[in-house]
């Protein structure tokens, strides 16, 4: 009985310390940096799972350490032999029932509820007010065009590709892999992956296919504020792969309109 009380006390102490650690982590953002509502959903789902699993993890680790220290064989030989048993039906039953319930819970939430949220964001496809950004991935460069604004290739003063987005807006990325500068076969593309770490989302780009990624921006920020705010290819696509990146800026709507006007001048 004394061992059970000792173990339970140790378990509670470690679990409470663990939960405190998780809450500190949450305050400092579990992901590196999140700038979309979708990224925030992912962060919340991760927070939900980790909060529930800390006591489970603490139980296993404390059980292991407690048994090693308390019932270590060297110590036992010198002292006494405790009552041996090979099966504790109550313990095994409770363990199995809790495991099944936790798995069922995680299947329903956050997994199934996240799928429903993804379907909801797909409905943005029918929303004409969303900002459309056409993304072309080539070896080794990202090209961005804004068909609603007549911008064929967004670039900075030095001619490098840049991605500008207005804050608090749903954006539909249309993703394709081909090479407009490849003279003999523009469709001889390879697999790339469109990844902005701060979006909390990623989508592979397959030659010959058109894929989509929907995000809703929720923070004014840029690559100079945090390096996670950049497009980075996340699928090995040749020697230039690590350098296949482009800076991202999320700006206010007024700043976005000013940028559009400036880009239009650059295009002509
Ligand atoms: Cu690539």
Image (cartoon, rainbow, N blue to C red):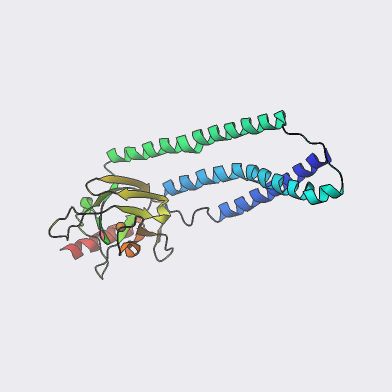
Q: Going 33% across and 39% down the picture, which residue do you hit?
A: 122
**The N terminus sits in image quarter:** top right
Q: Going 47% across and 46% down the picture, which residue do you hit?
A: 42
> Residue 67, percent across and down?
74, 46
Q: Going 34% across and 48% down the picture, which residue do you hit?
A: 203
> Residue 63, percent across and down?
71, 44
Q: Where on the image, by quarter, is ligand 1?
A: bottom left
Instruction: Name above or below for residue 19 compared with residue 223.
Output: above
> Residue 266, percent across and down?
20, 65
Q: Quadrant of residue 183?
A: bottom left
Q: Residue furthest bottom?
A: 158
Q: Residue furthest front?
A: 77
Along the line of sight, which residue is nearer the eye, 235 or 52? 235
> Residue 256, percent across and down?
31, 58
Along the line of sight, which residue is nearer the eye, 128 or 200? 200
Instruction: Name above or below for residue 56 compared with residue 96.
Output: below
Q: Is residue 123 left or right of residue 107?
A: left
Residue 199 in view of the camera:
yes
Instruction: Name above or below for residue 43 compared with residue 115.
Output: below
Q: Is residue 81 left or right of residue 52?
A: right
Q: Going 44% across and 38% down the picture, which residue do you hit?
A: 114
**The C terminus sits in image quarter:** bottom left
Q: Residue furthest left?
A: 184
Along the line of sight, which residue is nearer the eye, 171 or 238? 238
Q: Is residue 101 left or right of residue 82?
A: left
Residue 169 in view of the camera:
no
């Amino acid at each position: 009985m004394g061992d059970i009380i000792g173990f339970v006390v140790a378990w509670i102490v470690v679990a409470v310390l663990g939960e405190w650690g998780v809450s500190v982590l949450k305050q400092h953002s579990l992901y590196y940096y999140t700038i979309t509502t979708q990224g925030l959903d992912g962060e919340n789902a991760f927070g939900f799972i980790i909060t529930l699993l800390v006591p489970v993890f603490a139980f296993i680790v404390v059980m292991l350490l407690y048994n090693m220290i308390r019932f270590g064989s060297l110590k036992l030989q010198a002292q006494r032999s405790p009552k041996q048993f090979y099966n504790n039906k109550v313990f095994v039953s409770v363990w199995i029932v809790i495991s099944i319930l936790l798995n069922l819970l995680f299947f329903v939430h956050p997994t199934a509820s996240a799928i429903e949220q993804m379907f909801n964001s797909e409905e943005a496809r029918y929303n004409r007010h969303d900002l459309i950004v056409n993304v072309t991935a080539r070896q080794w460069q990202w090209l961005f065009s804004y068909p609603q604004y007549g911008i064929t290739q967004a670039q900075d003063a030095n001619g490098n590709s840049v991605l500008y987005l207005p804050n608090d807006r749903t954006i539909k990325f249309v993703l394709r892999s081909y090479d407009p500068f490849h003279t003999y076969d523009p469709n001889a593309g390879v697999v790339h992956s469109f990844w902005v770490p701060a979006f909390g989302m990623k989508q592979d780009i397959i030659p010959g296919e058109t894929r989509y990624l929907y995000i809703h921006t929720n923070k004014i920020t840029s690559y100079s504020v945090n390096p996670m705010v950049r497009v980075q290819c996340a699928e090995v696509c040749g020697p230039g792969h690590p350098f296949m990146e482009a800076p991202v800026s999320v700006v206010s709507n007024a700043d976005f309109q000013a940028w559009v006007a400036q880009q239009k001048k650059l295009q002509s």
